[in-house]
Image (cartoon, rainbow, N blue to C red):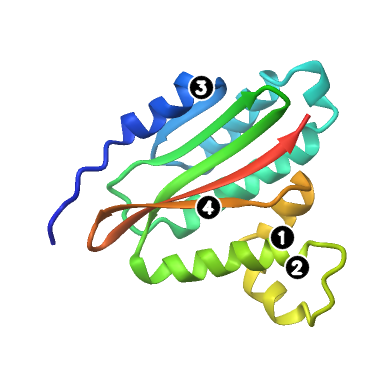
Amino acid sequence: MKALHFDINKYLDQYYATSDVLVSFKGMLTENKIGRLLDELESNLNKNERELRSSILIAANEMLDNVVKYTSNKILPQVFIAIRKMDTLQLITANTITPIQVDSLRNAVYDANRLSQPKTKIDHSEAKEKNKKLGLIDVYHKTKNPIQINFYTINDGSIFAEVIATFKV
């Protein structure tokens, strides 16, 4: 397996340089750390963002739980960053997954975005069942915006998967 150069610090620097960072974490997540990150996020919300406080915290908790549950390589760090850009607040999680998990995550995000649209006229039961484990439909409903995903190749066995939820404030 040939390792490609993926610099997690350079990855994080892109957010530090262009955004107001509310919370930033790089390491291994635990339930206690998740609680502290949610507390820090809540304390750093602006007055106008506090109206969305419960939605922001629920979405962040769902996303952080997914990172803990679905990380494939526990040696590489997990990431959570909450940023403010003009009139948006973004929650970003990133963790390693296997190449086999890429299509599953991509499809789950696609389904959550598609099924959450009010004009969608399809049988939702199968896709909702697939996404129940990930809570992505809940994240979409809290943000009222499409979930974004990006993938960065680390090596043949590990992909760094980034999930972004955006709130308009």
SS type, badge 3:
helix
Which one is earlier in the sequence, the residue at label 1 or at label 4? 1
SS type, badge 1:
helix
Answer left or right for 100 relative to 45.
left
Where residue 74 is drawn, which disc sits there?
A: none
Residue assigned mark 2: 115
Nearer-the-camera pick, 117 or 24 = 117
The amino acid sitting under disc 2 is Leu
Where residue 137 is drawn, which disc sits there?
A: 1
Residue 20's place in the image compared with 81, above or below, is above
**Label 2 Cα neighbours within 10 Å, binned few <14 / some 14-19 / many ≥20:** many
**Residue 94's x, y, as percent?**
45, 45
**Residue at position x 80%, y 62% from top?**
117
Which one is earlier in the sequence, the residue at label 3 or at label 1? 3
**Label 4 Cα neighbours within 10 Å, binned few <14 / some 14-19 / many ≥20:** some
**Residue at position x 78%, y 40% from top?**
55
Q: How many angstroms separate mark 4 from mark 3 (CA)?
A: 19 Å
The amino acid sitting under disc 3 is Thr
The amino acid sitting under disc 1 is Ile
Q: How many angstroms separate mark 1 from mark 2 (CA)?
A: 8 Å
Which one is earlier in the sequence, the residue at label 1 or at label 2? 2
Which one is earlier in the sequence, the residue at label 4 or at label 2? 2
Residue 23 picture quarter: top right
The amino acid sitting under disc 4 is Ile
Q: Are marks 1 and 2 in contact (CB under 8 Å)?
A: yes
Residue assigned mark 4: 149
Residue assigned mark 3: 18
**Label 1 Cα neighbours within 10 Å, binned few <14 / some 14-19 / many ≥20:** many
**Residue at position x 85%, y 28% from top?**
51
Q: Nearer the viewer, mark 3 or mark 1?
A: 3
**Residue 164's x, y, as percent?**
58, 44
Q: Are marks 4 and 3 in contact (CB under 8 Å)?
A: no
